[in-house]
C-alpha cells in the first residue's frame, strides 16, 4: 500500500521519494519516466531512471521509506 509519492527538482536532478504502509509479496521497485499522466499499464514510451531494481525493505507486511 502506497502512502505517499513525491518528486522534487533539485538543481539538474529530480529527487523521488515514496513511503509504503505495507508490502506484501513485494520483491523490488523500478522507477520509470514518461511524458503525460498515465494510469494502469506502463506506457510504451516509459524509460527506466534506475540502472537496477531497488530491493523492497518492508518486512512482515510492514512499510518502508525509499529515495
Image (cartoon, grey):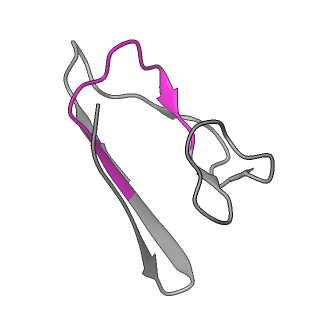
Q: Is residue 26 magenta?
A: yes
Identify the residue at image location x=72%, y=46%. Answer: 43
Q: Residue 10, percent across and down?
A: 44, 81
Q: Is residue 52 above or below residue 1?
A: below
Identify the residue at image location x=80%, y=46%. Answer: 44
Q: Is residue 24 magenta?
A: yes
Q: Is residue 7 above or below residue 66?
A: below
Q: Residue 25, percent across and down?
A: 40, 12
Q: Is residue 4 above or below residue 28?
A: below
Q: Residue furthest bottom?
A: 11
- Image quadrant of residue 12? bottom right
- Given residues 40 and 12, the one toward you in this image is 40
Q: Left or right of 11: which side holds 6?
A: left
- Image quadrant of residue 65? top left
Q: Residue 33, percent across and down?
A: 64, 58
Magenta-tinted stretch: 17-30
- Given residues 35 and 22, the one toward you in this image is 35
Q: Left or right of 51: which side holds 44?
A: right
Specify the quadrant that holds the N terminus. Answer: top left
Amino acid at each position: 500500500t502506497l502512502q505517499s509519492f513525491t518528486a522534487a527538482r533539485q538543481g539538474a536532478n529530480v529527487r523521488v521519494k515514496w513511503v509504503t504502509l505495507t508490502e506484501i509479496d513485494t520483491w523490488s521497485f523500478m522507477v520509470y519516466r514518461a511524458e503525460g499522466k498515465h494510469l494502469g499499464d506502463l506506457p510504451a514510451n516509459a524509460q527506466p531512471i534506475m540502472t537496477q531494481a531497488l530491493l523492497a525493505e518492508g518486512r512482515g507486511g510492514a512499510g518502508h521509506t525509499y529515495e
